[in-house]
Amino acid sequence: MAVWKLHGNGSIQPGAVVAPDERLGWGKMFGLGAQHVVAMFGATFLVPLITGFPIPATLFFSGVGTLLFLLITGNKLPSYLGSSFAFISPVLASTIVGADGTKDIGKALFGIMLTGILLAIVGAAVHLAGSHWIDVLMPPVMTGTIVMLIGFNLASAAWGEANKSGFWAAPVTGWITLFAIVLITVLFKGLIGRLSILLGVVVGYVAALLQGQVDFAAVGSAAWLGLPHFQLPTPDFNVAALFLPVVLVLIAENVGHVKSVSLMTGHNYDKTMGRALLADGVATTLAGFGGGSGTTTYAENIGVMAATKVYSTALYWIAGTIAILLSFIPKFGQAIATIPAGVIGAAGTVLYGMIGLLGARIWIDNKVAFTNPVNLIPAAIGLIMGIANFTFTLGDMTFGGVTVGTITALVLYHLMRVIAQARGTNVAEVEEVTFPDYEPESLS
């Protein structure tokens, strides 16, 4: 396990880079670690707000997952594990809402746990056999398609009319939040610009407060100190089909993260790829077992490292510990839970669209040729199935749009590719199989 050595005299000079196994003075490190908490927070707390998961438990497993990630990767790979937006669609589909509006997330937790177990198995396989087989299974055209259909499948959740929530519930507040996010993005540079969604939510919250849309009753009655609300999953293998595509997205996110960090630090982390997948799988499994949201590596924190040039893993030990400590303040969790539906719907509008367009970025970065029907047709079919939420029932199992679109696209792509190569009917060469280097959790 890497040991932190002091970088120079403990201060960073202009143009200097702090390596993963280095650190600055501990006072500076604490401030930079707290900055990583702020960077991850905007996306991490939105997931439980949208899905109805307890915020303290989500923060707890986010922090614990980050520390586990550091341990499993030998303290060599700087990364924060926050809530993954890829879980939102299957969680909403598997959550049972009672007549009084209460939500039973037991089955959703079981799906998260199954996803984590499968991802951990994939990580172990990659560690032993390498990652080339992932590139073959999911070339850029399919990776982009899966990411895109998961993002756009959530469009109706952002509007929220079916559940009387989201943007639909408070359109004035939603528009204010939306324009605040847009303006902050283009008006400010550096960290403020990177935190546009979080700061836009703050502006929307103030607007909702002025309109009397915020209820502080639960905040006043909450204690200052207390345990997070933990919950065991409810076993139901019928939800497995809903969560299967999420494994593919988590693989793409983690591999993209490892490659991005390699480019920034100049370190070759290919041999750490399997450990990274295994670590996220273990963290997600633990979250599903105890009542938290599934996790993934965060591009927001990659952005902070790129801006500061400080890649020390010590920052993530600090950030993970802070997240755990915050989870033991119930009043803090209740305060976050007061954010009204209009604000959440506006933030979701931006985030879900960004997830979808990350898929397009993968296509562009890898020069995917859509003049080739082998690329075009499976992607087109999969996207429409995902966006329109094609739903089929087989026995007791229900397959939603994300699952149907993902499986259909993958099967059609590999089937068409084999037949086209055998028959010589390709009109263009299928793109070289390489894995995209992209920063996923703007996915968050």
Image: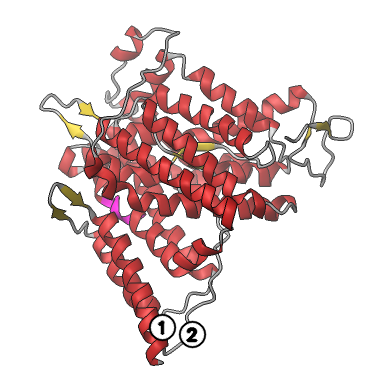
Question: Horizontal placement of 126 versus 101: left or right?
Answer: right
Going from the N terminus, do you reach mark 2 or mark 1 first? 1
Determine the residue located farthest toward the right in the rendered image: 9
The x and y percentages for residue 322 are: 57, 22
**Residue 429 circle label:** 2
Determine the residue located farthest toward the bottom in the rendered image: 424
Provide the residue designation for mark 1. Answer: 372
User: What crowding class fits label 2: few (fewer than 14 Cα within 10 Å), some (14-19), or many (20 or more)?
Assistant: few
* As drawn, 380 above or below 165: below
On the rendered image, what quadrant is the N terminus found in? top right
Of residues 408 and 299, the one nearer the viewer is 408
Magenta highlight on residue 252: no
Amino acid type of the residue tagged 1 in the rendering = Asn
- Disc 1 is placed on an element classified as loop
The x and y percentages for residue 231 are: 33, 22
Residue at (45, 46) in percent of width and height = 119
* As drawn, 324 above or below 17: above
Decide whether the magenta segment is chiefly helix, strand or loop.
helix
Query: What is the CA distance from the residue labelled 2 to the residue labelled 1?
Result: 7 Å
Question: Horizontal placement of 73 versus 372: left or right?
Answer: right
User: What crowding class fits label 1: few (fewer than 14 Cα within 10 Å), some (14-19), or many (20 or more)?
Assistant: some
Magenta residues, as a range?
Answer: 151-155
On the rendered image, what quadrant is the C terminus found in? top left
The x and y percentages for residue 70 are: 62, 35
Contact? badges 2 and 1 (CB < 8 Å): yes
Residue at (32, 76) in percent of width and height = 377
Amino acid type of the residue tagged 2 in the rendering = Glu
The x and y percentages for residue 406 are: 32, 61
Residue at (50, 51) in percent of width and height = 253
Image quadrant in which you'd find residue 18: top right
Asked whether residue 350 appears in the rendered view, the answer is no
